[in-house]
Amino acid sequence: MGSIMKLLQQVLYRHLHIHPRFVNKFTLVTLLFVVWVGVFDTHSFWDSYQLSRTISRLENEKVDLKKNIEVAKADKIDLENNKEKYAREKYFMHKEDEEVFIIERTK
């Protein structure tokens, strides 16, 4: 075990310039733990990031759906109050002796 530790200390010192006295079994176990929790665990940083993005997307969708609900409620009230006006405006219905002119607005 001692020769593996010395070899690891030399490799880390050469490539990462980490002084050999900072490389011991405690720092290696701590580093292994951080890597395990950060990458491989079920509650890893990557999974937390993806979940936060999903939550953000769903909250935005919730706001859009609330706006759609308000529009639908307004349309329902309009329909209940004046059915003939609603049918003429939304579905272009007309009586037999009437002519309907549809004017489309371009944006």
Image (tube, rainbow, N blue to C red):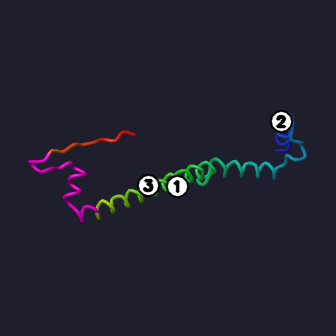
> Within 10 Å of the Cα at label 2, are there few (<14), some (14-19), or many (20+) other Cα atoms?
some
Disc 1 versus disc 3: nearer the observer: 3
Taking the magenta stretch, the answer to whether it contains residue 34 is no
- The segment highlighted magenta reads 78-98
The residue shown at (25%, 51%) is 90
Q: Nearer the viewer, residue 4 or 10?
A: 10
Quadrant assignment for the N terminus = top right
The residue shown at (70%, 48%) is 35
Q: Nearer the viewer, residue 32 or 5?
A: 32
Whether label 2 touches label 3, CB < 8 Å: no
Helix, strand or loop for disc 2? helix
Taking the magenta stretch, the answer to whether it contains residue 85 is yes
Numbered-mark total: 3
Relative to 74, is 17 on the left or the right?
A: right
The residue at which mark 1 appears reads as: 55
The residue at which mark 3 appears reads as: 64
